[in-house]
Amino acid sequence: MLAERMKGLNPYIPGEQPKDRNYIKLNANENPYPPAPEVCEAIRNFIKEHPEKLGLYPDPDSYELHCQIAKMLNDCGGVLCRSSVKDGRCMPSQQDKIPFEVTPEMIYVGNGSDEVLSFVFYAFFDSDRPVITPTFSYSFYPVYCGFYDIPIKKIELKPDWSLDTEKMIEEAVKTDSGMIFANPNAPTGIALTREQVRQMLKKAPADKAFVVDEAYVDFGGESCIPLLAEFKNLIVVRTFSKSLCGAGLRSGYLVANPEVIQAITTVKNSLNHFPIDAITQIASAAACKASGYYAEKAMAIARERDSFSEFLKAHGWNVLPSKTNFVFAQKPEVDGQYAYKKIKQDGILVRIFSTPGIENYLRISIGTAEQMAALKKSMESL
Ligand SMILES: *Cc1c(COP(=O)(O)O)cnc(C)c1O
């Protein structure tokens, strides 16, 4: 009964979501804080005041949400944890200020950035040449390559776990290909500067998609949105799931030049006309308006991350320098599975990978101060 193409599928394995016990969940890089009160208020009001709208199709183009995302990006410069907050509103730091106005026509919102990424693969990567990506990056990229029958070329990381930008460019030029990577990268947490990405873009094939996944940039990286003025092939992918406390909402977006947005909209309209439901549109727009709240949470998480990294180092762990809401760490001579199980026994879930080369590393999402105190207690004896 199964179609032939099913044989090629190799699905993504998410972090476990157990139902048997109330674990402290530090395994999926979710935000430990609830959404801003304004978000819950907007959902309640919507249902109370417009119940009839649940019976009608939502705006297929999420136009109001596009406007609010553009406004948030212009306000905070695309990096929440460095913006300054006054009366609940964000102002960009000098480093992050976007030198042009991001317009709603530069935004596309989908059902989580996973869906947005899938449309990007469909629209811009062909099966006649590989997509260039690092050996260790978001593990959904190879899954989409399998799904759409696109070859993939993985480039080894450097010994310090940073991206080998020269090798990536060399390969892209050689095969006249596009590329995708997360910046900051996952699961390493290491970030390239905007200038480093700019140098890559200057050498990369100008007519092939160059995709930067900024799922974690709000916690301390540098956004590549300012580079959109210079490079028409750049596509920046972002999500509400991490810094905007909205993993359950399923809302993700891309920022790119309008031609890119039009292509992705064509893909959407060929598959599912209404990927963002009415409640998610309302809730996501309310989140954008409350960016000051999320900026403060991102700052708290960044502080907690830095102090947790210091704690781990003091206890003999190797910790990669993270600009995200997680750390990637390993203790010499401690088996990864052993560490993972010991921590789980203490009621805390962290992420472990079976991929050769990183099987002894733990990827630990940063939680609240209380959650991290419990984790420190558990890890002290490792
Ligand atoms: C979490 C994550 C995503 C997926 O985000 P959703 O919007 O929840 O689908 C995409 N890319 C990277 C690198 C991530 O870590």
Image: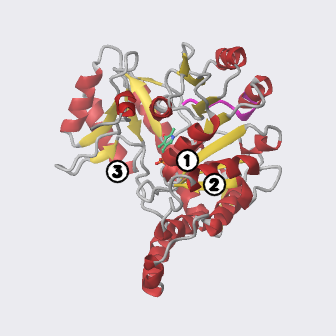
Residue nearest the viewer, comparing 198 with 53: 53
The residue that appears at 16% across and 49% down in the rendered structure is 20
> What residue is pinned by disc 2?
108
State yes or no: residue 51 in magenta: no
Q: Name the side, left or right, on which 320 lies relative to 355.
A: right
> What residue is pinned by disc 1?
116
Q: Look at the picture and state if 336 lies above or below 121.
A: above
Q: Look at the picture and state if 30 lies above or below 337.
A: below
- Beta carbon of the mark 1 residue lies under 8 A of ligand 1: yes
- Which quadrant of the view contains residue 44? bottom left
Residue nearest the viewer, comparing 23 with 272: 272
Q: Secondary structure at mark 1?
A: helix
Residue nearest the viewer, comparing 6 with 29: 6
Residues marked 2 and 3 touching at CB (< 8 Å):
no
Q: Secondary structure at mark 2?
A: strand
Amino acid type assigned to the residue bearing label 2 in the image: Tyr
* C-alpha separation, residue under disc 2 versus residue under disc 3: 37 Å
Dot 2 or dot 3: first in sequence order is 2
* C-alpha separation, residue under disc 2 versus residue under disc 1: 8 Å
Q: Where does residue 8 sit, x and y in percent of width and height?
A: 39, 28
Q: Where does residue 336 sit, x and y in percent of width and height?
A: 29, 22
- Please indicate, yes or no, whether residue 240 appears anywhere in the rendered image: yes
- Please indicate, yes or no, whether residue 301 appears anywhere in the rendered image: no
User: Which span of residues is magenta-colored?
Assistant: 190-196
Residues marked 2 and 1 touching at CB (< 8 Å):
yes
Q: Name the side, left or right, on which 368 lies relative to 153.
A: left
